[in-house]
Amino acid sequence: MTILTALARLLIFPGLLFAVPAAWFFLWVERKAVALMQQRVGPPFMQPFFDFVKLLGKSTPPRSGIAGLLMRAWPLIAVSSAAGAVGLLPVLPSSGGFQGDLILLLALLELPSICIIAAGFSSRSIFGEIGSAREAALSVSYNIVFLLAIVSIAASQHTFRLEALAAMHPSFLTVLGIIAILVCLPAKLHINPFSLPNAEQEIYAGPMTEYAGPELAMWELSHGLEWVASVGLVASLIAPHLAIAWGGAWLAICIFVAISIAVVLLLSTLAAATARLAIDSSVRFYWQCTLIFAVLAISSAILVRFRS
Amino acid sequence: MKLFQRLMCYARRHSPWLFHMNSGSCNGCDIEIVAALSPRYDAEQLGVRLEGSPRHADILCVTGPVTQKAVNAVKTVYGQVCGPKAVIAIGSCPATTNVFIDSRTLVGPLDKHVPVDVYVPGCPPRPDAIIQGVAKAAGILAERGSNQPVAAATVATIVTEEVSQ
C-alpha cells in the first residue's frame, strides 16, 4: 500500500469523509429505532449533527495539571484510533493492505474502550470510576469471545491479511465466526442490554460524567465511529466476496453500506427491545453462554487446518 | 464566520439537553417532566434529551420551593452546568414557593439564588406547557451564545398554560 492510497483510505473512503456522516447517521438510526419501537416520532434526521455542533460551542470547566491534560487527550485518541480502524476496512476489492493489518485493526478497535476506562479514572469522579470498572470487567469478558471468533476465521484462511479474509469463500466456520462477532457488538458499542458502563441516570453518565463541551462532542463522534468500524468489519467480511461475484467497486460500496445499515438496524432494534443487564449477568453471559461457541469455532478451525 | 455563528445558533435551538433538579418538590412536577419525555408527548422531536450529568446539560429544570437543605446543591449544580446555559423554574413552587410561603424551612423562591429564564406555572404544569417552556429556553439559549455573561440577563418569560380540553 503506497502512502497515497493509505491517505485516500484514511481521509476519503472508507475514512473520515465517509465515516463521519455515517457515524452521525448510525447514531440517528440508533435513536430513531428506539423511538419507532415506542411509537414516537423521534429525533429529526440532522439531530446528531446539531448535537455535535452545539457541544463544540459549549465551554468546558477549567482543568489544570496532568489530569486536565489527560482528560483533553483521551477523547482525541479515541476518535483518531476509531477513524484509523475505519480506514483499514477492506471495502473495495483489491484495495491494498498489508500482512497483519487484521491485528492492527483489532488493536485500533480496542483503543477507544481503553480510552474510556482511562478517561473515567482520570476524571476523579466516583461515578466515572464505577463506569470505568464496569467497562473494564465487560471488556475482559466480551473480548475473549470477539478475539477467538476473529482468530478462528483467520486461522481457517491461514492469513492475518484483511483483504484475503474479505475475499474468502464463505464456509460454515465463517458464518459461526460472524455470528459470534455480532453477539459481541452490543457490549463493544455499550448499547442495551450491555449498556452498563455508561448506564444513563443509574450512575449519572458513567466515565463521561465530568466531560463537557467539545470533549463530549469528541466522545459522541468516537462512539459513532466505533459503530462504523465494528459494523463495517462485519459488512466487509461479507460484502467484497459478493461484489467480486457480481460486479465492480461501486457495487462493493453499495453492498457494504447496505449490510452496515442492516446490522445497525438489527442492533438498534435489539437495544430498544431489551433492558440493561446487571454486571454479573453480563459477565456470566459471555463467560458461560457464548465462550463455548467461540472455543468450538477455534478448535474446529484448527482441526480444519490440520486436515487440509 | 457568520455562517458558522448562524449554524451554532440553529444547533443550540435544536438540541436542548436537560438536567432535572429537585429542590424539595412534592414529586408532582417531576412526574410531569417524565410525562413530557414519554411517547405521548415525545419531546425528543425538539432534540430534547434528559442527561444524567449536569456537565452535559444546557438547560437546568428546577422543581420544588428550594428548601434550606437543597439550596447549596442547587447553586453547585447551577455552577456545574457549562455555559451557555438557561434555567427553567417548573411549577409554582420555584416561582413563588406556592402554598409553602413563609415557611421557616424554605429559602426560596428560586430566583433569589440563581437567575431564572423561563417560568412554567402550574401545580403541576401540564407536559405540553413544560415542552413549550423548554422550546422558549432553547430560543433564549440560542440568542445568548457563549460571549455574553450568563448571569447578567434574567429574561422572565411567562409561559401561558394552554389547557387543552
Image (cartoon, grey):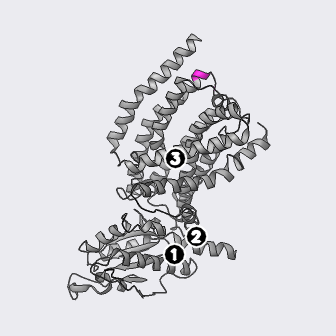
Quadrant of the frame with the N terminus of chain A: top right
Few, some or many residues within 10 Å of mark 1 (<14, 14–19, 20+): many
Per the picture, the main secondary structure of the magenta-coloured stretch is helix
State the CA–CA distance, disc 3 to disc 2.
Answer: 29 Å
Secondary structure of the residue carrying tag 1 is: loop
The answer to if A157 sits in the magenta stretch is yes
**Residue drawn at the location 67% of the way across and 48% of the way down:** A15
| Residue A122 in view, yes or no | no
Residue B84 disc label: 1
> Which quarter of the picture shows residue B91?
bottom left
Which chain's residue wears label 3? A
- Horizontal arrangement in the rendering, residue B11 relative to residue A184 (left or right): right
Which chain's residue wears label 1? B
For disc 2, the marked residue is A57
Q: Nearer the viewer, residue A188 or B131?
A: B131
Secondary structure of the residue carrying tag 2 is: loop
Q: Contact (CB < 8 A) between labels 3 and 2?
A: no
State the CA–CA distance, disc 1 to disc 3.
Answer: 34 Å
Rendering coords of residue A134 (x, y %): 39, 46
Residue B152 disc label: none
For disc 3, the marked residue is A264
Secondary structure of the residue carrying tag 3 is: helix
Rendering coords of residue A83 (x, y %): 63, 48
Q: Nearer the viewer, residue A133 or A113?
A: A113
Q: Which residues are magenta?
A: A155-159
